[in-house]
């Protein structure tokens, strides 16, 4: 079955549509780069260490980190430069790529603050759920995935292998639907675009919401 396309304004880097494969590939690439770092951009491990050494308390460090990531999303120069650093052979606009990277970098760094390793499959799955703007329990409920109460109390540590596979099978479609229901561009709350350049940066609300969800999931 052919995967449906999302219509995207042509002026955004001249991209007309984005497939589920392209979107998931971009998210996977961005997540890997959060753990590796980029030229002039710290890895999520180093970022977490920096904030923890400065604020000592993981929850306070997470709060300050969220504030910093929100500022990045509202700085058009930073977003434009970051988008140029993340190169991939998929039809994803650089501005959208930068948005995804900043949010995933925030999520994975918060995971590190909570004592988790972003390289773990369970942590990656929970990070991707956070990216949708849903809590884990909300997302699993929408996916129709049922879990036992004991597993649900500390899902990250106790996701059985078979359940993890089931969640991941449904997660790609959920992310695609989440982006598609409001339009890929609108989800990141881009404000006015003129000649393919963001004229005011990203709205901070989406990133802040995702940061709060990640804090709740990884710093219980």
Image: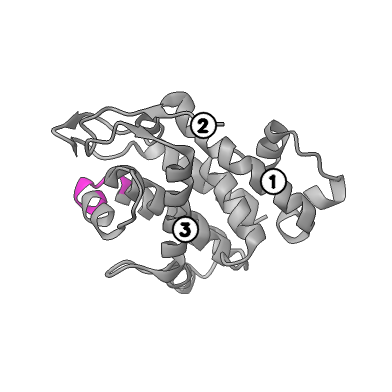
160 left or right, relative to 12: right
C-alpha span from label 2 to label 3: 26 Å
The answer to which of 58 and 80 lies nearer the viewer is 80
Which type of secondary structure does the marked residue at label 2 adopt? loop
The image's mark for residue 31 is 3
Pointer 1 and pointer 3: residues touching (CB < 8 Å)? no
Instruction: Where is residue 76? Give x, y as percent.
Output: 22, 45
Instruction: Where is residue 101? Give x, y as percent.
Output: 39, 53
Q: Is residue 64 above or below residue 130?
A: below
67 left or right, relative to 177: left
Quadrant location of the C terminus in the rendered image: bottom right
Residue in the image at 58% along x and 36% along y: 174
Residue in the image at 44% along x and 25% along y: 182
C-alpha span from label 2 to label 1: 22 Å
Mark 2 or mark 3: name the one nearer the start of the chain. 2
Discs 2/3, front: 2
């Amino acid at each position: 079955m052919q995967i449906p396309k999302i219509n995207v304004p042509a002026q955004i880097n001249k991209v007309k549509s984005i497939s589920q494969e392209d979107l998931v590939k971009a998210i996977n690439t961005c997540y890997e780069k959060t753990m590796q770092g980029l030229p002039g951009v710290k890895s999520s491990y180093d970022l977490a260490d920096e904030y923890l050494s400065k604020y000592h308390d993981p929850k306070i460090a997470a709060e300050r980190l969220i504030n910093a990531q929100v500022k990045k999303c509202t700085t058009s120069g930073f977003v434009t430069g970051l988008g140029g650093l993340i190169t991939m052979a998929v039809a994803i606009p650089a501005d959208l790529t930068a948005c995804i990277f900043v949010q995933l970098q925030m999520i994975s760094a918060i995971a590190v603050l909570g004592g988790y390793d972003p390289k773990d499959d369970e942590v990656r799955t929970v990070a991707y759920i956070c990216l949708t703007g849903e809590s884990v329990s909300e997302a699993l409920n929408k996916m129709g995935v049922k879990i036992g109460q004991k597993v649900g109390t500390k899902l990250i540590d106790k996701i059985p292998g078979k359940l993890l596979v089931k969640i991941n099978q449904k997660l790609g479609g959920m992310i695609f639907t989440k982006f598609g229901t409001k339009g890929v561009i609108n989800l990141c709350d881009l404000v006015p675009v003129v000649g393919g350049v963001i004229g005011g940066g990203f709205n901070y609300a989406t990133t802040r919401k995702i940061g709060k969800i990640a804090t709740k999931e990884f710093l219980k």
